[in-house]
Image (cartoon, grey):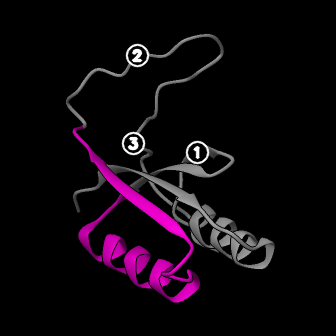
Amino acid sequence: MQRDLYIVAYDICTPKRLNRMRYFLKGFSTGGQKSVFECFLTQGELKEVITGVSNIIDESTDRVHIFPLDGRSRSHTFGAAIPPKDPEFFYFG
Protein backbone atom coordinates (compact mmCIF):
# COMPACT_ATOMS: atom_id res chain seq x y z
CA MET A 1 0.00 0.00 0.00
CA GLN A 2 1.61 3.23 -1.15
CA ARG A 3 1.13 6.42 0.81
CA ASP A 4 1.88 9.84 -0.61
CA LEU A 5 2.54 13.01 1.36
CA TYR A 6 -0.03 15.80 1.18
CA ILE A 7 -0.26 19.14 2.91
CA VAL A 8 -3.84 20.10 3.77
CA ALA A 9 -4.35 23.77 4.57
CA TYR A 10 -7.65 25.41 5.37
CA ASP A 11 -9.30 28.71 6.25
CA ILE A 12 -12.70 28.12 7.83
CA CYS A 13 -14.95 31.06 8.73
CA THR A 14 -16.99 29.75 11.67
CA PRO A 15 -15.65 28.22 14.91
CA LYS A 16 -18.02 25.22 14.74
CA ARG A 17 -16.88 24.17 11.25
CA LEU A 18 -13.28 25.00 12.14
CA ASN A 19 -13.38 22.58 15.08
CA ARG A 20 -15.06 19.90 12.96
CA MET A 21 -12.37 20.28 10.28
CA ARG A 22 -9.52 20.16 12.82
CA TYR A 23 -10.94 17.03 14.49
CA PHE A 24 -11.57 15.35 11.12
CA LEU A 25 -8.07 15.99 9.74
CA LYS A 26 -6.30 14.93 12.95
CA GLY A 27 -7.49 11.42 12.16
CA PHE A 28 -5.42 11.42 8.96
CA SER A 29 -2.42 13.54 9.88
CA THR A 30 1.06 12.75 11.14
CA GLY A 31 1.63 16.32 12.25
CA GLY A 32 0.58 19.85 11.75
CA GLN A 33 0.10 23.22 13.27
CA LYS A 34 -3.02 25.37 13.47
CA SER A 35 -4.65 25.10 10.03
CA VAL A 36 -2.01 23.09 8.16
CA PHE A 37 -1.66 19.30 8.40
CA GLU A 38 0.85 16.81 6.97
CA CYS A 39 -0.97 13.68 5.80
CA PHE A 40 0.44 10.46 4.33
CA LEU A 41 -2.55 9.11 2.41
CA THR A 42 -3.39 6.20 0.16
CA GLN A 43 -5.60 6.99 -2.84
CA GLY A 44 -8.62 5.66 -0.92
CA GLU A 45 -7.84 7.83 2.10
CA LEU A 46 -7.38 10.86 -0.16
CA LYS A 47 -10.88 10.29 -1.57
CA GLU A 48 -12.21 9.96 2.00
CA VAL A 49 -10.54 13.26 2.98
CA ILE A 50 -11.95 15.03 -0.08
CA THR A 51 -15.46 13.73 0.68
CA GLY A 52 -15.19 14.61 4.39
CA VAL A 53 -13.89 18.11 3.67
CA SER A 54 -16.68 18.69 1.14
CA ASN A 55 -19.26 17.71 3.77
CA ILE A 56 -17.83 20.10 6.39
CA ILE A 57 -17.14 23.33 4.51
CA ASP A 58 -19.39 26.09 3.28
CA GLU A 59 -18.16 26.44 -0.30
CA SER A 60 -19.16 30.10 -0.48
CA THR A 61 -16.90 31.22 2.40
CA ASP A 62 -14.37 28.50 3.38
CA ARG A 63 -11.14 27.52 1.62
CA VAL A 64 -9.26 24.22 1.64
CA HIS A 65 -6.11 23.38 -0.31
CA ILE A 66 -4.66 19.88 -0.67
CA PHE A 67 -1.10 19.99 -2.00
CA PRO A 68 0.60 16.78 -3.11
CA LEU A 69 4.30 16.70 -2.24
CA ASP A 70 6.93 14.55 -3.87
CA GLY A 71 8.37 12.30 -1.18
CA ARG A 72 11.70 12.23 -3.00
CA SER A 73 12.12 15.97 -2.56
CA ARG A 74 14.42 17.17 0.17
CA SER A 75 12.64 19.20 2.82
CA HIS A 76 14.31 22.17 4.48
CA THR A 77 13.64 22.63 8.17
CA PHE A 78 14.63 25.49 10.42
CA GLY A 79 14.64 26.03 14.15
CA ALA A 80 12.81 23.31 16.08
CA ALA A 81 11.14 21.92 12.93
CA ILE A 82 11.32 18.17 12.34
CA PRO A 83 11.11 16.77 8.78
CA PRO A 84 7.96 14.70 8.16
CA LYS A 85 8.40 10.93 8.24
CA ASP A 86 6.25 8.26 6.66
CA PRO A 87 5.25 6.22 9.71
CA GLU A 88 5.38 2.43 9.52
CA PHE A 89 1.72 2.15 10.55
CA PHE A 90 -1.30 4.25 11.36
CA TYR A 91 -3.80 3.77 14.12
CA PHE A 92 -7.31 5.07 13.57
CA GLY A 93 -9.31 4.96 16.77
- Which is closer to the viewer, label 3 or label 2? 2
- Judging depth in this view, the residue of 47 and 14 nearest the camera is 14
Judging by the rendered image, the residue that carries numbered circle 2 is 76
The residue lying at 37 percent from left, 58 percent from top is: 66
Task: Name the mark on residue 55.
Answer: none
The residue lying at 63 percent from left, 10 percent from top is: 79
Query: Is 45 contained in the magenta span?
Result: yes
- Judging depth in this view, the residue of 79 and 62 nearest the camera is 62
Residue 5 drawn above or below residue 85: below
Measured as percent of width and height from the top left, residue 24 is found at 61, 73
Tag 3 and tag 1, C-beta contact below 8 Å? no
| Among the two numbered marks 1 and 2 on one chain, the one whose residue lies closer to the N terminus | 1
Query: Is 86 contained in the magenta span?
Result: no
Judging by the rendered image, the residue that carries numbered circle 1 is 31
User: How many C-alpha atoms fall within 10 Å of the one at disc 3: few (<14), some, or many (≥20)?
Assistant: some
User: How many C-alpha atoms fall within 10 Å of the one at disc 2: few (<14), some, or many (≥20)?
Assistant: few
Q: Specify the quadrant of the image occupied by residue 42.
A: bottom left
* Alpha carbon distance from label 3 to label 1: 11 Å
* Residue bounds of the magenta highlight: 41-70
Task: Name the mark on residue 86.
Answer: 3
The type of residue carrying mark 3 is Asp
Residue 4 left/right relative to 7: left
- Disc 2 element: loop
